[in-house]
Image (spheres, rainbow, N blue to C red):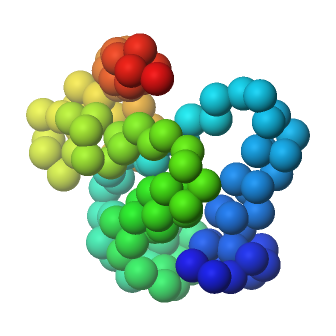
Amino acid sequence: MSDRTDDTFYGALRNLYTSLINKFPASTIVIMTPTHRIDENCMYNERGVCNMCNFEGYVNAIIDVAAYYGLPVLDLYRTSGMNPENETIRQKYMTDGFHPSDDGHRLIYERLKGFLSTL
């Protein structure tokens, strides 16, 4: 969490959030986590690169760093209703297991609209 270099996920997040805050100081910056993805707990990603932690660890890092800066987070990982490990959900909302379909985008839109109304 203390890292501020672009060489780690935490450091890159800190640099990203700081840059956004500095560039848009009067704006409300909203952070969204990614949704679940197929095979998210594999130790290697789709390009064969070894993950340093499971996918949920990356989601938690996004939330932790946003909390440090006081940025609101829409946690789609936990609240989108989309997990492609369920065949029915995958076919309706994210047929390739990664990217939302039109129905998936509508679902995210509804979540985002509700979230923004609370700010």
Instruction: Tell me residue 54's x, y (percent).
Output: 36, 75
Residue 102 in view of the camera: no
Q: Is residue 81 left or right of residue 9?
A: left
Q: Considering depth in this image, is 80 or 3 the residue closer to the camera?
A: 3
Instruction: Tell me residue 46's x, y (percent).
Output: 49, 66
Q: How many marks?
A: 0
Q: State the residue lying farthest toward the right.
A: 23
Q: Considering depth in this image, is 33 or 69 the residue closer to the camera?
A: 69
Residue 9 vertical placement versus 39 (above, below): below
- The residue at 32%/48% (across/down) is 77
Q: Is residue 17 left or right of residue 77?
A: right
Residue 78 vertical placement versus 94 (above, below): below
Figure quadrant of the N terminus: bottom right
**Image-quadrant location for residue 89:** top left
Q: Is residue 45 left or right of residue 76?
A: right
- The residue at 68%/82% (across/down) is 3
- The residue at 74%/77% (across/down) is 4
Residue 109 vertical placement versus 2 (above, below): above
Residue 48 vertical placement versus 84 (above, below): below
- The residue at 40%/64% (across/down) is 60
Residue 65 in view of the camera: yes
**Image-quadrant location for residue 53:** bottom left
Instruction: Tell me residue 39's x, y (percent).
Output: 30, 64
